Image (tube, grey):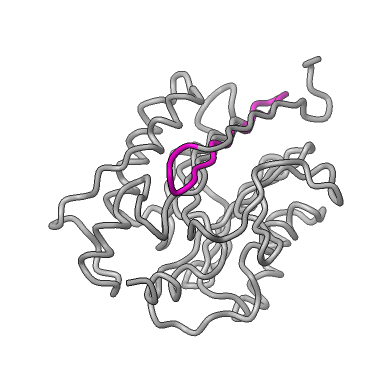
């Protein structure tokens, strides 16, 4: 199992994202996400980056990229990997797809089209790119860039809204909170560690034992699991990002950031 895990997840990745896009009158974007990774892979918690002080994100200390981040101007990007056991590994780290967009100024669709022009350099990925009123989703495994329709969507290690049990559970959980999105309630949703019944598991080529292990929203195993849960509330004037870190022995550091968008009315 360890070798298969390494082949699947050797690059930094976010393995579950659920988001409500333009579905709430006060929050154009409400997002909850779990990053799953090897426990031993060196990672920095969410911080503003010294060399890019507008960028707030965690950081993969092996390849230098990130899995999810936001900027003071409201640019947003997040990534999941695409589960494809045995596929050749790309030459570039997928985490750089997120950080390059956040450190640039191209419109989401323009940047997405540039990514697709060199998409074969990366292992399988799904990518969300947002700025202003535009949120683009794309994958180098059969999903050309398109603007995301308003509503609740979920993304794991297949294409957008693929009806895996964890995707459907996350979707339903966020949809139930749309009247009043709450950070702690969303973190509790992300902490759901109940595996899906065998009869509902997808068959992605990793075997039944691993399908079970990977099926909860929150993954626990000795070598690999959920390393961070993130909630992002992007209002019309302010942004709040909360990250709860985890180690192989339990909860770790919790970080909470809140700041005004340009022109916002906060202090």
Seen in the image, is 70 located left or right of residue 191? right
- Reply yes or no: does residue 243 show up in magenta: yes
Residue 172's x, y, as percent? 32, 36
Q: Quadrant of residue 28?
A: top right
**Range covered by the magenta-colored residues:** 234-251
- 8 lies above or below 53: below
Check residue 140 for magenta coloring. no
The residue that appears at 81% across and 56% down in the rendered structure is 104
Eyeballing the image, is 143 above or below 117?
Answer: above
User: Where residue 10 sits in the image (x, y, percent)?
Assistant: 52, 70
Identify the residue at horizontal 52%, vertical 44% (top origin).
Answer: 228
**Is 133 positioned to the left or the right of 194 in the image?**
right
Query: Which one is in front, 88 or 7?
Result: 7
Residue farthest to the front, as pictured: 249
Residue occupying the far left of the picture: 199
> In the rendered image of this protein, does residue 26 appear above or below residue 207?
above
Residues 121 and 66: in front is: 66
Quarter of the picture holding the C terminus: top right
Main secondary structure type of the part rendered in magenta:
strand
The residue drawn where x is 66% and y is 49% is 44
Near-viewer residue (222 or 191): 222
Report the number of discs.
0
Q: Position of residue 12 (x, y in %)?
A: 57, 62
Q: Nearer the viewer, residue 232 or 236?
A: 232
Residue 232: quarter of image: top right
Q: Quadrant of the N terminus?
A: bottom left
The image position of residue 110, as x and y in percent, is: 73, 61
Q: Is residue 132 above or below residue 10?
A: above
* Residue drawn where x is 41% and y is 60% of the image: 223
């Amino acid at each position: 199992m360890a070798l298969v895990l390494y082949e699947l997840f050797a690059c930094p990745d976010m393995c579950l994202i659920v988001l409500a896009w333009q579905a709430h009158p006060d929050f154009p974007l409400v997002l909850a996400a779990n990053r799953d990774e090897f426990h031993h892979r060196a990672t920095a918690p969410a911080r503003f980056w010294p060399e890019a002080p507008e960028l707030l994100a965690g950081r993969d200390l092996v390849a230098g990229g990130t899995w999810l981040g936001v900027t003071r101007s409201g640019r947003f990007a997040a990534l999941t990997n695409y589960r494809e056991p045995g596929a050749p590994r790309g030459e570039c780290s997928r985490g750089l797809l997120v950080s390059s967009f956040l450190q640039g100024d191209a419109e989401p669709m323009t940047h997405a089209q540039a990514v697709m022009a060199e998409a074969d350099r990366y292992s399988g990925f799904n990518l969300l790119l947002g700025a202003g009123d535009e949120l683009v989703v794309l994958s180098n495994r059969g999903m050309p860039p398109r603007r995301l329709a308003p509503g609740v969507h979920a993304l794991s290690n297949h294409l957008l809204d693929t009806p895996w049990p964890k995707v459907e559970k996350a979707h339903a959980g966020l949809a139930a909170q749309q009247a009043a999105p709450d950070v702690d309630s969303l973190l509790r949703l992300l902490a759901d560690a109940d595996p899906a019944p065998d009869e509902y598991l997808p068959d992605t080529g990793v075997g039944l034992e691993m399908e079970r292990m990977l099926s909860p929203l929150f993954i626990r195993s000795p070598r690999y699991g959920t390393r961070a849960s993130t909630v992002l509330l992007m209002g019309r004037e302010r942004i709040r990002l909360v990250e709860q870190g985890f180690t192989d022995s339990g909860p770790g550091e919790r970080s909470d950031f809140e700041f005004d968008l340009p022109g916002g009315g906060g202090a």
